[in-house]
């Protein structure tokens, strides 16, 4: 059974930074394309960023391009999301996702084989 555990969320002021981490257990993370999604109250869960199995390809939602950076260290079964220049509209629960499907990450918008429990990110104005 694959488990994903996020950490690193919290409360930060506008313009601040946070780094989220997601640790995979149960199976090596290299078997999965991975992504960060977020869900604000009353809204759908949207993809924020995705990364290919070997880390060679990445995808970012337009709303976070130039501010967020996704990366992974398969030797540690860990994925990261560095979030800079945070805005109040970035406030949401952030979820880690691991997916075994093969299509390119640029086509990934919804769904995943596995989800983490989520970590709250709150950006105050």
Image (cartoon, rainbow, N blue to C red):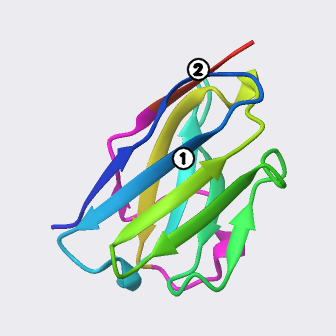
Is residue 9 visible from the viewing direction of this image? yes
SS under mark 2? loop
Q: Which image quadrant: the N terminus?
A: bottom left
Q: Which of marks 2 and 1 is nearer the N terminus?
A: 1
SS under mark 1? strand
Quarter-of-image position of residue 7: top left
Q: Distance between the residues labelled 2 and 1?
A: 25 Å
What residue is at 42 percent from the left and 35 percent from the top?
119
Q: Does the magenta stretch include residue 117?
A: yes
Which of the numbered marks, if any, corresponds to residue 42?
2
Quarter-of-image position of residue 63: top right
Residue 48 image offset from top left, x and y in percent: 66, 51
For mark 1, what is the residue?
Answer: 19
Which residues make up the magenta segment? 101-119
| Mark count | 2
Q: Is the magenta stretch mostly helix, strand or loop?
A: loop
What residue is at 47 percent from the left and 80 percent from the top?
101
Quarter-of-image position of residue 73: bottom left
Image check: 89 left or right of 75?
Answer: right
Residue 2 image offset from top left, x and y in percent: 22, 66
Q: Which image quadrant: the C terminus?
A: top right
| Front-lying residue, 7 or 61 | 7
Identity of the residue furthest to the top in this view: 125
Residue 44 image offset from top left, x and y in percent: 60, 35
Image check: 8 left or right of 47?
Answer: left
What residue is at 84 percent from the left and 54 percent from the top?
66
């Amino acid at each position: 059974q694959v488990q994903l555990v996020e950490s690193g969320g919290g409360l930060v002021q506008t313009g601040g930074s946070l780094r989220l981490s997601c640790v995979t257990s149960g199976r090596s993370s290299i078997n999965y394309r991975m992504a960060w999604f977020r869900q604000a109250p009353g809204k759908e869960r949207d993809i924020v960023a995705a990364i290919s199995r070997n880390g060679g390809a990445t995808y970012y939602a337009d709303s976070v391009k130039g501010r967020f950076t996704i990366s992974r260290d398969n030797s540690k079964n860990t994925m990261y999301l560095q979030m800079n220049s945070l805005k109040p509209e970035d406030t949401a629960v952030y979820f880690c996702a691991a997916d075994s499907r093969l299509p390119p990450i640029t086509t990934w918008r919804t769904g995943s084989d596995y989800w983490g429990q989520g970590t709250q990110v709150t950006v105050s104005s």
